[in-house]
Amino acid sequence: MHIAIAGNIGSGKTTLTQLLAKHYQWEVELEPVDNNPYLAEFYDDMPKWAFHLQVYFLHSRFRQMHRIMQSDKSTVQDRTIYEDAHIFAENLVENGILSARDFANYRGLYDAMIPFVKPPDLLIYLRADIPTLVGQIEKRGRSYENSIRIDYLKTLNQRYESWIARYTESKLLIIEVNRIDFVNKREDFAGILEKVEAELFGLFR
């Protein structure tokens, strides 16, 4: 089985990924953030580092997908390769941060990779409003995220909603993050588990 967690910056993807992996005793694939050589520079100067960052994420995610597809163990993955292209790269080019030339180069790489990628069995989308995202970002205290603009988060949220509305690659479960606290309230996490297991049961029918 392969479950992937999707959602905006600060929506709780990494935390839920780790909680589900621990609960089911599955493998975990986390987003390459802490050891990312471009992330801090990107938030300081987005136009300069946008292409480098997006290629790094695309390469890292493709390697993750290869490991997942080659493994005989079930895996929970933090963010998908689809989000890299359809959310973040497209948002950067639309806002003039990534040039059309660099985006065409990037999209060529993505289009060459995607035929070799198997979609997850279940995609979990964490839907969160801007105050929730900002609160989560401030709580985790990553210094390089202090410069993230509210309008940047808003446009990402809009792109996520548009992408999710047309997502058909696999089963989809939407979790409304604003209404729950799956970290501190066991009943909220239990509620997510019930929904996940309902989807997993359906997959095996």
Image: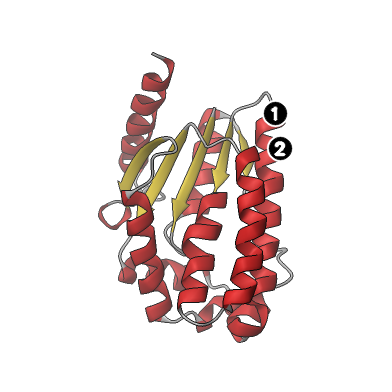
Q: Nearer the viewer, residue 7 or 26?
A: 7
The amino acid pointed to by label 1 is: Ser
The amino acid pointed to by label 2 is: Arg
Answer whether residue 79 is visible to the viewer in this image: no
Answer whether residue 124 is visible to the viewer in this image: yes
The disc label shown at residue 13, or none: none
Residue at left 25%, top 54%?
179
Q: Residue furthest left?
A: 179
The disc label shown at residue 67, or none: 2
Residue at left 36%, top 28%?
199
Res. 157 image quadrant: bottom left
Answer left or right for 202 relative to 106: left
Q: Position of residue 9 (x, y in %)?
A: 47, 64
Residue at left 59%, top 78%?
144
Residue at left 35%, top 39%?
173
Per the image, the residue denoted by label 1 is: 71
Q: Secondary structure at mark 1?
A: loop
Disc 1 to disc 2, how far (Cα)? 6 Å
Q: Is residue 94 above or below residue 187?
A: below
